[in-house]
Image (cartoon, helix red, strand yellow):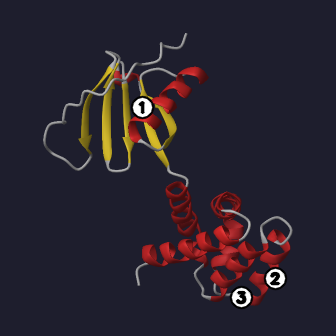
Amino acid sequence: MREETIAKNYAATLFELARRYEGVERYQGGIETVARLLDENPQFRTFLETPRIAVADKKRVLRKVFGDVLPGHLVNFLLVVLDKRRQRLLRQIAREYHDLVDQHLNRVHAEVTVARPLDGQALGTVADRLTRLLGRTAIPHVRVCPEIVGGVVVRTGPGCARFREGDRVIAFAPLEATAAPTPMATPWPMPPPSA
């Protein structure tokens, strides 16, 4: 079985545990804490991933570190991951779990590229408009790129929408498409530029 499929299966199992017990967002915070620790602490990652340290020792450390911090069923899940020797997939499991939570809560992450920084009000306006346009709660991740001159470029999953300050969506193009963008006539009032 491919690692991506295995990670998805483990994430789905964790999601079902979260739904039954303490809640999907609480488990999301917990699994992301573990993934962040693995990313930021190479010694911890090496400790968990090395086959030279006994699984029992790893489990003891996980219980000690996370036992009072994470939900009990999440800690047990981590122990099973160790038993099955899938600890090197924990970061991928966390990403897959995050995707499941987004689907469950009807959220979409959008990469929003703008020519100049947005203030809080403008960011809220962009999030509201994207939410209405996409039909799901939009979570914008803003990137400033002065080279685009003006307007907004939005990427969500397999698509890329380009907007101009002329108060309307001017194009939508799938990222994998080679043809010209498809014109759209959806209103898109842009927030005023930040000072």
Residue 48 versus residue 31 in the image, above or below:
below
Write the residue at 60% across / 73% down.
Answer: 16
In percent of width and height, residue 102 lies at 53, 54
Q: CA distance from mark 2 to mark 1?
A: 45 Å
- Seen in the image, is 144 located left or right of residue 37? left
Q: CA distance from mark 3 to mark 1?
A: 45 Å
- Seen in the image, is 1 located left or right of residue 19? left
Q: Amino acid at mark 3?
A: Val
Q: Which marked residue is nearer to the observer: mark 3 or mark 1?
A: 1
Instruction: Please tell me in which quadrant of the rendered image residue 86 appears.
Output: bottom right
Circles 2, 3 touching at the beta carbon (< 8 Å): no
In percent of width and height, residue 116 lies at 47, 20
Q: Amino acid at mark 2?
A: Arg
* Earlier sequence position, callout 3 versus callout 1: 3
Write the residue at 15% across / 45% down.
Answer: 178
Q: Amino acid at mark 1?
A: Thr
Q: CA distance from mark 2 to mark 3?
A: 9 Å
Residue corresponding to mark 3: 55
Q: Which mark is residue 60?
A: 2
Instruction: Please tell me in which quadrant of the rendered image residue 101 appears.
Output: bottom right
- Per the image, label 3 sits on a secondary structure element best described as helix
